[in-house]
Structure formats: structure tokens, C-alpha cells
Image (tube, helix red, strand yellow):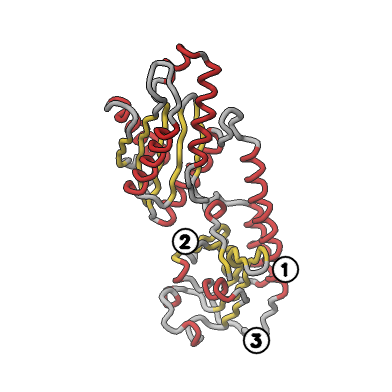
Amino acid sequence: MRILDACGIMDVTPDERFDRVTRLASRFYEADVAFIGLVDGQFQSLISLNSDALGRNVPRRDSVCNMIVESGRPLVVGDLKTDPRLAGHPLVPHLALHFYAGVPLIAEPDLVLGTLCVMKREPGDQESFDLAPLLDLAAIATNEIAQWKLNLELKQMSEIDSLTGLPNRRIFDDAFERAIRRTRRTAQPVSVLMVDIDHFKALNDLAGHQMGDRVLGQLGQLLASTPRRPLDTLARIGGEEFALILPDTDPAGAKMVAEALLETLRQAEILHPAGGFVSASIGGASQRGAEASASALYLAADMALYDAKRGGRDRYCDQLASPV
């Protein structure tokens, strides 16, 4: 089965539309625990969970639900502690739960989003368990996830900067918060790049604002044309300033991206009215883990951008952000 990299929705704040499904599942089956878990290549994240008996994030390979994700089929286990299919499982001995039933969330043939599961503290009869209601609730959950993603796409389309065609500051802020939640969840690094056109005021003063707008549009197109991963977010955040959010990227990776952006602009050879070509300065910063802070990361990248300007422009500087 293919697996959806569901980062965008895996890092949302609690949402009533998903909690409603887990409440119904818990009540119908008189379960102690009900949850919706989504997966990407590495992790399972519970976007709705009605109990504190489970953690919200776990490596996907260590999750019981991974058996469902890999097979694309429901799984019912009368007793997790004694079922031979789970012998040697790394998490089962640590659970205060015995009965487990889960079904896959399948968005389209051969595409698995995650699972909807119920669990009980006492063992149960797996042979008589009625999967039909759980499958119906999983279909509802899958539809809600599809609607969530569609709403996000429509929201992003309505918040595009008309001059550059890039997402605007509001999209950047939303994506930045999701990236911070992701690094807190996965402990993978997150980096942000701040890109600022050099001597932009002089460009406007010498050639007029129409030329300035044209250069902004050209730079936006150049930035958008550089290779990016689906998780990355590029935006114009104000004036002549752009930003790039890079989840799962350490300082070395951020530097490689920044240097590639600078080289792309150099090769474009956009004439500057003061002489030479238009260049940019880039500041970057990185964080990881539970102490990650959007404000600290943004401030560190901004300070690094100032260092790049002060150091002669047309260059990249970086800092490690400190938690606040």
C-alpha cells in the first residue's frame, strides 16, 4: 500500500470534526480508548485521541497500527499481550490495554492515510467483533480529512501575493507554526531562511517603484522555480523580504538551499540601476525538538540576515536559535 505523507494535517491543533468521530467510536464500542492516527514515512501521529493512555506520537515502525497501514486491512486482536502476531513487539508490554481493533483510512485505492482504532483495558472476543460500524466511521473520518485538505488549499489560493504569485505572510505564519509543531513531535530539525533584496531602496529611488515591483516579481519567479520538497513553504512576507520554511532540515541542509538560491539569482543577471546586478542576502536559523519556538527561530534568522547585510551582502549567514 502507498502511504500518504500527511505532515500538513498531522501537525494541526485538535479539531472537533475528528474528535466527533472518536467519541462516536468510543461510545458505540464502549471502548476505553479511541483514536485517529495518521502516518508519514517515519511517524504515526494521533490527530484525535480521547484518552491519556497513549502518547500522541510514535515511530511508525513501533506502532501496532503499522500492521494495518502495511497490509491495508483491518486488524482485531483479542489480547495484545498473548497474540502471537505481536510477540516481541516493542510497545505492547508497556500498554495497560489488551483489546485492539483498527481499520485503515483509505483515501483512494492503494493510498493509506492512517487508521481509526478502539482499544479496551480488558481482553475481548476478536471473532465476534463487528467491524462494520468502525468501517463506516473510518469512511466519515477519511471524508473529513479530504475536506480539511481541500479547505486548506482553497485558503492558500485566496492568500496569494498578487505581485509575486507566492503565498503571503498569513500562509507563512500558519506553515511556520505547523513546522514548529512537527519538530516538537518528531525531534527532527527545522530551518528557516530569510531572503532580502540588496539595495532595494536605491533601486526604487533610481528606477521607480514600477521597476521595483518588476524585480520583486522576477525574484519571486526565480525562488519559485528552484527545487523544493512538498513540505517546504516559500512566501513573500513583506516588502522586499521572502522566507522559506524547511522542515526536517539541519543547518548544513539549509546552507545548501541558501547557496543554491543565491547562485540562481546571480545567474539571472537582473540589472541594478546603480550598476551591476541585483543580489540578495540570506539569513538562516535552525532548531529541533520540544523546546523549539517560532519566535526564537524567526529572530535568529532575522539576526543572521542582518549579519549577511553587514558582512557585504550577496551572501548567506546563519545562527542556531536558542529556545525562549
Residue 107 against residue 85 in the figure, above or below: above
Q: Which structural element holds mark 2?
A: strand
Reading the image, the residue beneath label 3 is 127
Tell me the kind of residue under disc 1: Asp
Reading the image, the residue beneath label 2 is 57
Contact, mark 3 vs mark 1 (Cβ under 8 Å)? no
Residue sitting at x 35%, y 31%: 305
Q: Nearer the viewer, mark 2 or mark 3?
A: 2
Q: Which mark is residue 80?
A: none
What quarter of the picture does the N terminus occupy?
Answer: bottom right
Q: Within 10 angstroms of label 1, few (less than 14), some, or many (20 or more) residues?
A: few
Residue 218 against residue 17 in the figure, above or below: above
Residue sitting at x 58%, y 58%: 48
Query: Foreground residue, 87 or 194?
Result: 194
Tell me the kind of residue under disc 3: Glu
**Mark 2 vs 3, N-terminal side:** 2
Q: Nearer the viewer, mark 3 or mark 1?
A: 1
Tell me the kind of residue under disc 2: Asn
Q: CA distance from mark 3 to mark 1?
A: 19 Å
Contact, mark 2 vs mark 1 (Cβ under 8 Å)? no
Question: Where does residue 45 sit, x and y in percent of width and height?
Answer: 51, 60
Q: Which structural element holds mark 3?
A: loop
Question: Where does residue 244 sit, x and y in percent of width and height?
Answer: 45, 40
Query: Foreground residue, 78 or 102?
Result: 102
Reading the image, the residue beneath label 1 is 136
